[in-house]
Amino acid sequence: MQTRTRGVTAVAGLAVMATIATACGGSSSGGGGTNNESSPPQTSGFQKISNNDTGTPAKGGTLNILSSTDTDYLDPNVTYYSYGYEMVHPWSRGLYAYQNEEGHQFDVIPDIATAAPDVSADGKTVTVTLRDGVFWNTSPKRAVTADDVVRGIKTACNPAQPFGGLPDFDFLIQGYQNFCKGFAKVDPTAKAIADYTENTDLPGVVAQDPTTVVFHLTQAASFFPSMLALPTFSPRPKEMDAYVPASTQAAQHTIADGPYQVQSYQPTKSIVFVRNPVWDASTDNVRKAYVDKITINMTITDRSVGLKQQLAGTPTADLCELCVGATDLPSLLSDPGLSVQSEVASNPYIIFNTQSPNNSGALNKVEVRQALSYALNRDHLLQVAGGTRLNVALTHVLPAQIHGSKDINLYPNNPTKAKQMLSDAGATGLKLKFLYRPSSESSKKMFQVVQQDLGQIGVKVSGVPAQDADFYTKYLQRPDSAKAGQWDLSLAGWGPDWYGDAALSFFGPLFDGRILPPASSDFGLFNDDTVNACIDKAKNAKTTDEANTAWGECDEDVMKAAAFFPITNPNTPLYHPPFVHHTVFMPVYQDYDWTNIWLDPDKNGG
């Protein structure tokens, strides 16, 4: 998501207003394999698909990418950001991945696993067999083993920077919650983390032998095999014990088992991937690795300049992250290089900081949040997001493609009612701080719309600008920032960790108040007993039908509590020049898969 945090892509042009915190997904079959019938539709509103998948793929050259943002952490077991997933994909292989084929991007396929996981009759034992011939680029090279997989899963709940999606599965893996509670008490140093990781058993994840990993679950969970496509389940080499997970030092010492390795990484500036000499293409059905080198320039400050370079065929601008703006769209509609597809996400949404001490803690009151929800005009917000052709209005938690989605709208725009509710709650004259990213024109416009809408009911909104690199790591992911009142309102985006039966990947990380950031993405520190009980009921449902009914109830509970203000399930617009081929949109990255792109030989960069 990113998110993304599940992932999240930088707030940018057109429909992509916020970063998706996690963005992992798979088929909803629960079998870990391709299941086209259960994959949700990829269309939502306006759609234009263009992957330029023509001609004979050519190998070689450099894929040059322009970007204005960096990943959260260059660490596959910790990153919880769509762009982070994309940044680790070239050099880090997971148990499973997503198929890079038009119409099948939600289908889970084996990566370092040999096949779909074997699930016991009672659904509580899941066994994964690893491929032979997958190596770390150590000296000498060493095979990736089941012990490495166990180490990676243990690292996900490290005390320095745990994985943000832990609520998705910490209750499912036997002994994992207790393991993580113990881990939280460990000093966040490399040695202490390594000692705990290597010397503390995790009964729910066992290396049966060098090529067999066995998961012991607390209950049957049909979605768990698809969840194994999350990068956090990737193997982790023992050499990484020398560094604190997700640290700057760890990012400078990555060890690769994919087709590429990190040649250089300058945070917020650039990253370069070159070929990994120990990678064996015959073991990898996910990445074709056509180009020899991938370079990402993260210093672009004007996305319109990047798009102009693409349109001009500049060899240093093969791709440009989120460079299509609302004003660019009319001139690109007839261009075969434009591709617009559904994110299957809630992106963006407005966060209420429920623990802010500002205004005598007014945002902690349900009635105040409800009043603000009535005052906000979703149509105005959709307009600055590129209009309704590119944005499907979302008035509740779950996008339509996620099972359990319930179409409700509890807060039709009504400023008069909002103003009266604030008066009744004794919360007139509110002064709210809006955290936003000034690097994004659309983020600024969203802030201005909120400022205008709430101004009509007597609420004064001032801006708190934050750099892209700080937005999550220094503000949203830090409960102390929320509790100190550094912000009252903000924007974020969210996509499912998997697809279909994926409601848990929204409700667990976003609304379970028993788990705080950075272990979750409940940035507004929302905590409601009714919602928590509903989440428990739904995730413990014995059948899919029971679960979907319960998730619909949870959706309504969240909206009654005005936990957040959803805006849209948007489409993502991307552009590629005619010499860039096999540009299949991957919802997990909110972008193309760089490892499967190939370039015309006479336009292969340098």
Image: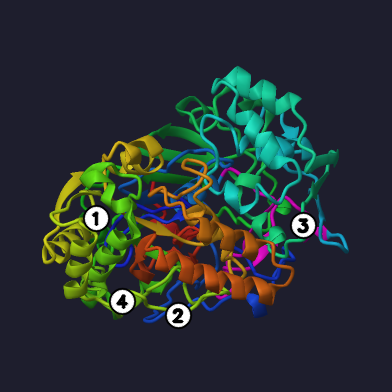
Q: Is residue 22 in view?
A: no
| Secondary structure state at the residue bearing disc 3 | loop
Label 1 or label 4, whichever lies nearer to me, is 1
Dominant secondary-structure state across the stretch colored magenta:
loop
Residue designated by label 2: 407
**Dot 1 or dot 4, earlier in sequence:** 1
**Dot 1 or dot 3, earlier in sequence:** 3
Distance Cα–Cα, label 4 vs label 3: 50 Å
Residue designated by label 1: 303
Residue drawn at x 34%, y 41% as measured from the top left: 482
Q: Which residues are magenta?
A: 91-118
Label 4 or label 3, whichever lies nearer to me, is 3
Residue designated by label 4: 335
Quick check: 190 left or right of 600? Answer: right
| Secondary structure state at the residue bearing disc 4 | loop
Distance Cα–Cα, label 4 vs label 2: 35 Å
Q: Which mark is residue 219?
A: 3
| Secondary structure state at the residue bearing disc 2 | loop
Mark 3 near mark 2, Cβ–Cβ under 8 Å? Answer: no
> Around disc 1, counting alpha carbons within 10 Å, would you say few (fewer than 14), some (14 to 19), or many (20 or more)?
many
**Dot 3 or dot 2, earlier in sequence:** 3
Q: Amino acid at mark 2?
A: Asp
Distance Cα–Cα, label 1 vs label 4: 18 Å
Within the magenta stretch, is there residue 47? Answer: no
